[in-house]
Image (cartoon, grey):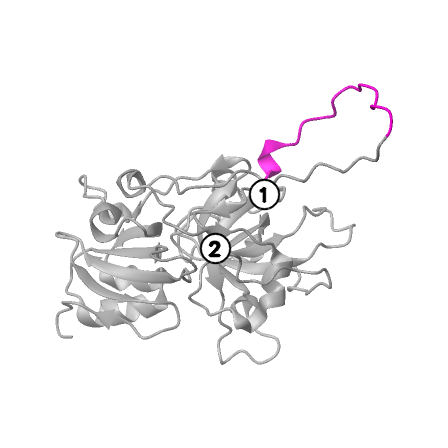
């Protein structure tokens, strides 16, 4: 059983990582909707040697495993680890974007697809697990590393090896870089409660996993897989924004992706498909906070119907009745 987050005493950097000045997202990003800019893997500084004879040549050691060499950045967000996120605590606003690196494990006991058949790890499933600083022994015989409990909502694509797994499969912890935000503990949670009470982090996008950059493919309800549709990111975002998630659904199903947006969709949008998008605000000035926002677009013309930020009241734009 996966245990709850435990702070550590390891020294950490200030959570709000130093930002890279300037605009870092190329215009091609919105057209391709595949990858954001990544800085390379973290490089360790070369050791300082004392004066003396030159060392004898030796056989090179094993090359580092590229599958676990985490990218240092996502766009202009510096990647941090679980210990740093835990140290920041409630000082992080729930809409502020975070690039979190670590080893992902998904818990089948806390993941479900409702009435849908099949394994509980697919894109239409609500999934929970952990991101830890290091891999852990799946046998449970070794001490557990520092970690945070994560919520992977419906619509967020996980690596294929996880999404295709069955509940009884033994999955090794996978190195990932994800983009998301701090989870807000519901007011009804007092002491022990359901899984939602233990969430520390909400994943909005898996950007890199096991040495491979993960592209962003919009999710489309099976009932709407009838024709080619315009790219909602290319026409609705400016050049500095980064897309995190996109899904085409009926208004009554938006709540599965986002409860805040779902209440707007069900109350004020007529019976037509809508695009639900989650987006990372672009760095329009040096040092600007990067925040997550959601948008609802009318499917025929991609007109913005409503928008908001996690945990904040939604705004509307052209929503019928509002």
**Residue name at image x 22 percent, y 53 percent:** 236
Can residue 194 be seen here? yes
Task: Characterize the local packing of mark 2: few (<14), some (14-19) or many (20 or more) Cα atoms within 10 angstroms.
Answer: some
**Residue name at image x 62 percent, y 59 percent:** 13
**Percent position of residue 138, x then y:** 69, 46
Q: Which mark is residue 19?
A: 2
Residue projecting furthest to the right = 52
Query: Which sits in the foreground, 163 or 45?
Result: 45
Q: Quadrant of the N terminus?
A: bottom right
Q: Is residue 227 magenta?
A: no
Mark whose residue sits in front, 1 or 2: 2
Q: Quadrant of the C terminus?
A: bottom left
Q: Which residue is mark 1?
A: 175
On screen, 90 above or below 50?
below
Describe the element under mark 1 as helix, strand or loop. strand
> Could you say which quadrant of the image residue 153 lies in?
bottom left
Magenta segment boundaries in residue numbering: 52-69
**Percent position of residue 278, x then y:** 34, 57
Mark-to-mark CA distance, 1 and 2: 23 Å
């Amino acid at each position: 059983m996966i245990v709850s987050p435990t702070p550590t005493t390891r020294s950490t950097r200030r959570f709000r990582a130093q930002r890279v000045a300037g605009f870092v997202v190329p215009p091609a990003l919105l057209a391709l909707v595949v990858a954001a800019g990544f800085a390379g893997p973290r490089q360790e500084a070369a050791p300082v040697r004392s004066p003396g004879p030159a060392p004898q040549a030796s056989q090179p050691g094993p090359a580092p495993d590229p599958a676990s060499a985490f990218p240092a950045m996502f766009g202009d967000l510096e990647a941090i680890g679980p210990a740093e996120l835990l140290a920041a605590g409630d000082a992080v606003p729930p809409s502020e974007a975070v690039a979190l690196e670590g080893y992902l494990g998904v818990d089948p006991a806390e993941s479900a697809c409702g009435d849908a058949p099949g394994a509980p790890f697919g894109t239409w499933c609500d999934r929970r697990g952990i991101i830890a600083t290091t891999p852990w022994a799946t046998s449970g015989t070794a001490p557990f590393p520092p970690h945070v409990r994560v919520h992977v909502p419906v619509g967020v694509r996980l690596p294929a090896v996880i999404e295709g797994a069955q509940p009884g499969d033994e999955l090794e912890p996978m190195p990932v870089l994800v983009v998301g935000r701090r989870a807000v503990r519901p007011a009804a949670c007092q002491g022990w409660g359901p899984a939602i009470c233990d969430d520390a982090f909400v994943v909005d996008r898996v950007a890199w996993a096991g040495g491979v950059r993960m592209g962003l493919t919009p999710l489309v309800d099976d009932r709407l897989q009838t024709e080619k549709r315009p790219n909602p990111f290319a026409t609705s975002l400016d050049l500095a924004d980064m897309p995190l998630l996109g899904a085409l659904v009926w208004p009554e199903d938006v709540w599965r992706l986002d409860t805040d947006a779902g209440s707007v969709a069900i109350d004020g949008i007529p019976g037509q498909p809508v695009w639900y998008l989650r987006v990372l605000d672009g760095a329009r000035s040096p040092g600007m906070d990067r925040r997550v926002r959601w948008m609802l677009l009318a499917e025929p013309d991609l007109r913005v119907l409503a928008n908001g930020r996690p945990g904040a009241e939604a705004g509307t734009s052209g929503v019928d009745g509002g």
